[in-house]
Amino acid sequence: MNLSQRLSNSFYQVVAAINEPHKVYLVQHRDSGRFYVKKILDVYSADVYKDLQAHPIPGIPRIIDSWEEDRQLVIIEEYISGVTLRDMIESTSSPAADTDLREVLTVERIGRYMSDLCEILERLHEHNPPLIHRDIKPSNIIITSCGNVMLLDFNAARFYSGEPGRESDTRLLGTKGYAAPEQYGFGESSPQTDLYSIGRVLQECVDVLPKTDIDSGNHIGRQKSASEKITDPHTFDSVIQKCTQMTPSKRYSSAAALKNALLGCLGQSSRPDIMGPMINPYLPPGFRTLNPWKMLIASVVYFLVFDLSLTLKDQTASMQVLWMERLLVLFLGLMNIALGSNYLGIQRYMPFHSSSSPALRIAGVLLTMAAATMIVFMSGIFVIGTFFS
């Protein structure tokens, strides 16, 4: 460990052990006072963590720092507060009188969590190069207090080559019961490997549900009301069966296809993947899939936004103020495009994102766009009036 790494290490003070056997600790930065998670890994791919640090992916804790020391990899990553899906499974299986109903699984919640997890996998599998997690299990999935899903632990992750005839996995990295057959040497890990694990996790979640499941989760400690909606835990049987096929080619073709199937089971609208996979999530909205028709429509929209903003006229303003107003209008237009198109998964931080109602989710997006527009517009006018008038 060089001097720079020693300095970085000294900044983080261990506060508590989160998982001592696996060398996972809660640490606090001495200067900022912020809390992070420190992991000391014996089995790892340094290239995977360096890539995640350089290219953060929504739905995955940010890698703050990393360095190698004595054939181990030390990781400092964002601290995520919430409950693991493992905890929720246990709470649902053996509910206590004081069980928090928000931590109890229902068919609706399971479907929502798994579809959100598919969104994370879409970003991983469409990364350049694609990343395969290879260790998806309930303890590696956290549900935050806002209902957002976060995927942890990339110790077993690897880049996917996609090359024909690539040799099989030669070393089992994953967890028994969730690892796909190809992880035992029957083939190369691929995006379908992660979909197999989701099928196993989905099956485990469904298995702890009562025979009839009340969407609201209020089935604990009281009788069912005739007005309550009952959903069938067997809703996902066909999805589970397809996910857990022994042959990868018989599973879903992508995480997007699996997400559509999950939404279909919940009676929600699922979109056919006609636009193709997202090539680069960091490209501007409309260009991320490199679909010609989508890029054409996006080009027209961008042209109109630029034309409207850069030809704006204000007879009462000086040229300097006029151009500041034009830039403000341009920024507002691009900001709303990003918010409305869920750029880099930003909509997961908006109100009602976790709601099962499409109308509520749309309302949350519109409210956020309106509030952001008002705040940015008023702030911009204040700055322009203060410094450029």
Image: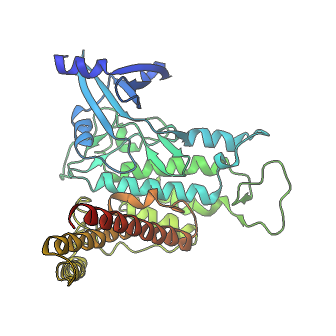
The residue lying toward the viewer, choosing from 91 and 247, is 91
As displayed, is residue 19 above or below residue 337? above
Position of the N terminus by quadrant: top left
Q: Is residue 283 left or right of residue 12?
A: left
Position of the C terminus by quadrant: bottom left
As displayed, is residue 168 above or below residue 216? above
Identify which residue is drawn at 40% across, 28% down.
33
The quarter holding residue 335 reads: bottom left
The residue lying toward the viewer, choosing from 326 and 336, is 326
Residue 289, image x and y in percent? 25, 68
**Residue extending furthest toward the left:** 319
Q: Is residue 165 left or right of residue 262?
A: left
Residue 268, image x and y in percent? 54, 72
Q: Is residue 342 left or right of residue 298?
A: right
Q: Is residue 305 left or right of residue 102?
A: left
Q: Is residue 252 visible?
A: no
The residue lying toward the viewer, choosing from 73 and 189, is 73
Identify which residue is drawn at 42% across, 56% down.
118
As displayed, is residue 58 above or below residue 13? below
